[in-house]
Image (tube, helix red, strand yellow):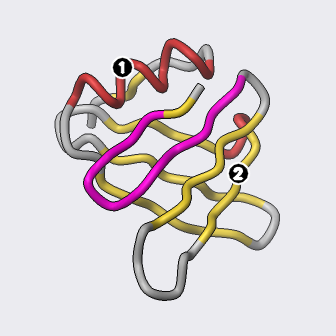
Amino acid sequence: MKVTFSEGDIIVNPHEMVVRLNNTSRVTMQAETDALTLIGGVNVISAVGSGMKWSIKLDNAEQLEILAQELGIAIEFY
């Protein structure tokens, strides 16, 4: 599934997520589902594991909910 947000596109399946940013350097970030945390309230995706650490803010809670459903993981609230 593909979700478009203001900074680029997120391609997601039950096993992994790829974020492609629409900036001049065309940054691509990838993470397996086990390394992801979806943070509600602030609409952030966080990826930590195997030497990687990145996070990105989405435009709204609806995008985060779509990703949670596709990945099969819960949204966490802190």
Q: Which residue is drawn at the image coordinates 30% and 54% (left, top)?
A: 57
User: Magenta residues, as a range?
Assistant: 3-13
Residue at 27% across, 37% down:
78
Q: Is residue 4 magenta?
A: yes
Residue 44's spot in the image, x, y percent? 34, 47
Q: Secondary structure at mark 1?
A: helix
**Is the residue 1 above or below the residue 70 in the image?**
below
Image spot of residue 5 (x, y percent): 32, 46
Whether the residues at callouts 2 and 1 have beta carbons within 8 Å, the answer is no
What is the residue that sits farthest to the bottom in this orientation?
25
- Mark 1 belongs to which amino acid? Glu
Residue 65 has which mark? 1
Please tell me which of labels 2 and 1 falls first in the chain: 2
Does residue 13 appear to the left or right of 6 in the view shown? right
State the residue at coordinates (60%, 68%). Answer: 53
Residue 15, quarter of the rendered image: top right
Q: Is residue 46 above or below residue 16?
A: below
Residue at (41, 78) in percent of width and height? 23
Q: Which residue is mark 2?
A: 31
